[in-house]
Amino acid sequence: MTYIALIIVLIGIELIYFKIADTYNIIDKPNSRSSHTSITLRGGGIIFPIAISIAFLLGYVSWAVTLAVILVAVVSFIDDIKPLSQLPRFISHFIAVGLVFYELNLFYEPFWLLPIVFVLLIGWVNAFNFMDGINGITVLYALTAIASFSFLPINEASLPLLITMGLSCLAFGIFNVRKKAKSFAGDVGSISMALFLGYLMIKTIIDSGQLGYILFFSVYGIDAIITIISRLLRKENIFQPHRSHLYQYLANEMGYSHILVAFIYAGFQLGINALVIYLDSNGYLTLLFMGGFLLLLTLIYLLVRNFVTRKMVLGNS
C-alpha cells in the first residue's frame, strides 16, 4: 500500500513540476547536435533527487548519500536553467563523491585506492550524463540497473530504497518513454541518478567482495569509452556536445525509433546482468571471466559500430 501511494505521489509531483517548468520556460530547444526536433520541457529527472529525499524521510537511506545526490542535483538543475562553468560542477561532484566515500568508509581503505575509485566514479557520472541523448534511454537503463541490484541477496536490506528509486523511474518514464517525450531528464536527473547508481555499485562490490558486478554498467561504459577514444583520435573536444555515440548513430543517422534503441540498450544490459547473477550464484564469476567477457563485449560493440558507420557512409555517398 505504501508503494502504491508513493507512485501516485511521485507522478503528482512530476505533473506539478511540468506546470512550473512550463510557467518559467525551463525547456530544451533542439540544435544541430540534438536528437529531438521540437521544444521539450527539461528537468523531469528532478523526481530522482526528490525520491531519494522521500526515502531519507522514510528511513531508507543515510543523510550522507541523500545530501550527495541533492547537492549534484541542485547544481545540475541550475546548470539546466543557466549554463555554469566547469568549476562549480566539479566542486559539487568532488564533495558528493567525498560524501559517498564517507558513507562507505572508504577513507579507511588503502590511500592508493581512493584516487582510482574517485576517477572511476566521476567518469561513470559523466558517462551516464553523456549517454542521456534520446527518449527513454536514461530511465530504462537506470531501471535495468536498479532491478538487477534488487535481485542480489546482498542488497536485501536496501530493497525499500531500491523500490523507491525504481518507482521514481516509472513515474518519469510515463512522460519520457514516448515517441514525443513530455519532458527530458536534464542534467538534474541524469547526474543525480548516475551518482546514486555509482554509490550502489561500490556498496555492492564492497559488501559482496565481487568485482564482477561492474559488468552491470558494461554497455554504457563500453559505448562511452570507445566514443571518447574515437573523438580524441579525431582531435575533437570531448567535453563539447556531439552525436558520436552508437545509440545516436542508430537513432539519428540510421533512423531507428528512439524507444527501440533505448529498449535495445536496456535489454542487452539486462541480459548481461542476468548472466552475471547466474554465474556468480554458481561460483563462475571470476576475474578471468570478467576480463574475457569485457573483451568480447568490446569486440561486439566495435563490430556493430563499424557496420553502422559503414552503412552511414554508403547511405551518404
Image (cartoon, grey):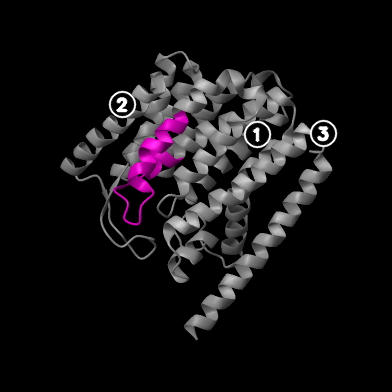
Q: Is residue 231 visible?
A: yes
Q: Residue at x 41, y 37 (%)?
A: 170
Q: Is residue 215 magenta?
A: no
**Coordinates of residue 234 in the picture (x, y in percent):** 57, 68
Q: Residue at x 69, y 25 (%)?
A: 206
Query: For this view, does 158 lie left or right of residue 81?
Result: right
- Tell me residue 248's x, y (percent): 48, 62
Nearer to the camera, 263 or 73: 263
The CA span between labels 2 and 1 is 36 Å
Which residue carries the number 1 mark?
Answer: 117
- The dot on residue 9 is 2
What range is drawn magenta here? Answer: 165-190
Q: Main secondary structure of the magenta part?
A: helix
Say which amino acid is labelled 1: Val
Relative depth, front residue between 102 and 47:
47
Location of residue 35 by image quarter:
bottom left
298 relative to 254, above or below = above
Amino acid under label 3? Gly
For the residue labelled by badge 1, is the local secondary structure a helix, a strand or a loop? helix
For the residues labelled 3 and 1, the Cα–Cα distance comes to 25 Å
The residue labelled by disc 3 is 283
The amino acid type found where label 2 is placed reads Val
Say left or right for 159 vs 41.
right
Which comes sooner in the sequence, label 3 or label 1?
1
Q: Is residue 245 visible?
A: no
The picture places residue 19, in percent across and down from the top left corner, at 19, 38
Q: For mark 1, does the 10 Å Cα neighbourhood hold few (<14), some (14 to 19), or many (20 or more) residues?
A: some
